[in-house]
Amino acid sequence: MIKQLFSLIITLASFSAYAQTTAGYKMGDDGIEYKIISNGKNDLMKTGDFMEIHFTTSIKGANIDSVLNSTRDNAVAQIIPFDSITLPLSYYKIFSQLRNGDSVSTVTSTDSIISKQNGQPLPSFMERGMFIYTNFQIVNVYKNQAEADSARQENMAKQEVMDKKRAAFQMDIDEKIIAQYLAANKITTTKTPKGTYVQITKIGTGAKIDKTKIIKIKYKGKTLDGNIFDTNMDNSKGHTEPLSVNLTDDVSLGNGVIPGMTDALLMMQKGTKAVMYIPSTLGYGASGAGADIPPNANLIFEVEVLEVLSKAQALAASANKMAPVNKKSTTPKKLIKKVKKK
């Protein structure tokens, strides 16, 4: 994520060749303007160190002052090597002036970006007269790989706690939204252990699906407002082949599906038809998926279970599918002779 951010800023800054630098900022390589806020108390960072940093990127203008990305809101600090391989050279030179506890701010102008975009699309929020600021803060410096790895393990544990808290908070919101939708449309459902709401419209036959099975399904996925983002029930999305869903822990047997759908499928049997109401935390979460599934979107899936296969059956079916076609007749020779005589 850090390297992507650096690359983005350099791309933007490459368009931003000002006649004068922004007040209080120095001009660095690649047209990057920067300002360092230093406590001057520690040693300068050296190649081979590992720096733990927080960063926040925001856009400011006459009618906007908005944070675009921040590790303080969404994640723990990032730990990366301090060297000219990991960092773009222009940033390596800037960060070489920093100590533990220091901060550096970079700024680019949207005017220069827009005037030199060369036909490339820009974010919809970007207009002339704005400035993009990124602030980096060095929160710690580690002198070797072992120290950095130990700090990463601690950060991963912190991240897991933060993720669980955010998911629990969002789940409460999702459940209220789905409950209101179900009540308004007079839909009766059963809630799965993880939190998906399932309306069985046709009961299937045989044993319930479990996590030793590979199944094939027809499906239609849409948001609560009715926007269909994918389906194989018709050709509107360009595919009608049944979807193979691997519920086992053997990744060689294929792909799984989002947790909310997996949870609902375990209530079903071969031939079952159902409608699943999936909270965003059991779907695509805060990231969403493409243009059709926004962040924190609760989803509806209409599903029909066509086949339920064991691992052995799935492997056999895969082998048959991959086997070369035998163009010779498979009719027994005795039968051929009898047909000829007749």
Image (spheres, rainbow, N blue to C red):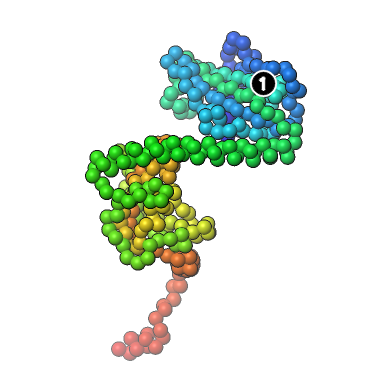
Residue at the (41%, 86%) spot, across then down: 333
Q: Is residue 160 visible?
A: yes
Q: Please, is residue 337 above or below residue 55 in the view? A: below
300 relative to 13 in the view: left or right = left
Residue nearer the viewer, 289 or 140: 140
Q: Amino acid at mark 1?
A: Asp
| Residue 329, position as x, y percentages in the image | 41, 78
Q: Quadrant of the C terminus?
A: bottom left
Residue nearer the viewer, 32 or 25: 25
Q: Residues within 10 Å of mark 1 (few under 14, many from 20)?
A: many
Q: Which residue is mark 1?
A: 102
Residue nearer the viewer, 134 or 202: 202
Residue at the (31%, 41%) spot, across then down: 179
Residue at the (64%, 21%) spot, across then down: 103
Q: Please, is residue 259 above or below residue 320 in the view? A: above
Quadrant housing residue 143: top right
Residue at the (55%, 28%) spot, across then down: 72
